[in-house]
Amino acid sequence: MSLLITGGTGYIGSHTVVELLQLTDGNIEQDIVIVDNLSNSSTKVLERITQITDKTVTFIEADIRDESALERIFTQHTIEAVIHFAGLKAVGESNEIPLAYYDNNVSGTVTLLQVMKKHQVKKLVFSSSATVYGDNESPLHEGMTTSATNPYGQTKLMVENILFDVAKSDADWSIACLRYFNPIGAHQSGLIGESPNGIPNNLLPYVSQVAVGRLKELQVFGDDYNTIDGTGVRDYIHVIDLALGHVKALQNLEAIKGCKAINLGTGNGTSVLEIVNNFSEISGVSIPYKVVPRRAGDLATVYADASLANELLAWKTQYSITDMIADTWRWQSKNPNGYN
Ligand code: NAD
Ligand code: WQD
């Protein structure tokens, strides 16, 4: 039996693959097949995964929109379940090239679901996002109404709705829609981590590239929010905790009848300046920053009600903000240019 991981050479996918390969409880024993078109990742990740785990995975370079490529994968391997990470994820870029986002994220997922259905594979873990909560007030819980303010968010919402409909149409499906908050950090080995192309959009990759001297200074988007120090507050979650959330979701898929949305966050918020100060302290490098106006679309405070994941999956986060920053710094300082 095999597990198919779409987008498995990406940031969250690669960390999840490592945790799956290192499972010792014998609960999941499948081979791992990764499909990725390498649009935002590198095959170097595969060598690093083997370095960490001493195990290999099957890698197929293909696009999830390519139905015949997926058809070949499902014919050549006995796929039991799919973890679906593949997609585009930059909010700003999604406003500029919305069609590419709808094509990759929505059409790509529909193609994947069609091939899964054809091959009677009806177990899926999907990468959703806290962005589907729109401007609801935190703590955000799964019962809240959903909405989107940009094409990226729309694609996550559309896919969630498609998954709910698919599960409603056929009781054999078990689908976990995992709504991630803000994943940061890296594997403790420093061998895999986040390696964005171009100028990073997210806070942590930006701060760490300032720390290694690739970028001059951080722009802090607003210090006049109603928060502890006026800067934006987010629920940062260690990528390893997030990866372990996928393992738990997979192990509990049988119990999830239909499609279930589940938050993966810590339930705690940290401000931009708290991140910057902690990063300077842990790395010993000062992080120059300048406060600039608020970024359009940003909310003051976003954090999860993480109780459902605890109840349903027996999952809780283990790592602190200090761990997240220490691991980000280990990865970035050992690999100043990421995988390049
Ligand atoms: P990533 O870009 O590092 O990984 C995504 C992977 O998918 C990349 O390796 C890319 O090459 C691949 N890919 C993209 N389009 C593809 C296609 N059409 N066919 C095959 N492969 C394709 O991103 P990530 O941070 O690891 O995110 C993984 C998933 O989690 C995404 O769906 C993203 O929207 C979601 N998510 C991410 C965050 C975050 O902050 N990182 C938060 C919430 C949700
Ligand atoms: C965090 C905080 C910024 C950069 C985004 C997506 C969301 C999800 C996670 C995928 C905010 C501030 C940032 C900078 C800054 N992704 N900031 N200077 O916006 O919470 O969420 O990534 O699903 O959908 O919207 O994360 O890391 O961009 O910002 O001051 O250069 O850092 O204003 O308060 P965000 P982020």
Image (cartoon, rainbow, N blue to C red):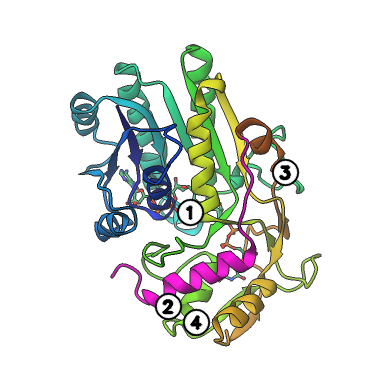
Query: Residue 77 vs residue 197: left or right?
Result: left
Nearest to N terminus: mark 1 or mark 4: 1
Q: Nearer the viewer, residue 302 or 65?
A: 302
Q: Position of 208 compared to 103: left or right?
A: right
- Label 2 vs label 1: CA separation? 32 Å
Residue found at x 24% / y 56%: 43
Q: Label 3 to label 2, Cα distance in Å?
A: 33 Å
**Other-residue count near label 1 (Cα within 10 Å), few / some / many at <14 / 14–19 / ≥20:** some
* Residue located 34% across and 46% down the image: 8
Q: Are marks 1 and 4 in contact (CB under 8 Å)?
A: no
| Mark 4 / mark 2, whichever is N-terminal | 4
Mark nearer the N terminus (3 vs 2) = 3
Above or below 145: residue 226: below
Q: Which residue is mark 3?
A: 305
Q: How far, Cα to Cα, is label 3 from label 4?
A: 32 Å
First to last magenta residue range: 314-340
Whether residue 78 is situated above or below residue 298 in the rendered picture: above
Residue 327 shown in magenta: yes
The answer to whether residue 99 is left or right of residue 64 is right
Q: Secondary structure at mark 4?
A: helix
- Left/right placement of residue 2 relative to residue 311 reads left
Q: Quadrant of the C terminus?
A: bottom left
Q: Is residue 255 above or below residue 64?
A: above
Q: Which residue is denoted by mark 4 in the rendering?
A: 211
Element marked by disc 3 = loop
Query: Can you identify the residue that label 2 sits on?
Result: 333
The first of marks 3 and 4 along the sequence is 4
Residue 95: image tag: 1
Residue at 25%, 58% (x, y): give it: 47
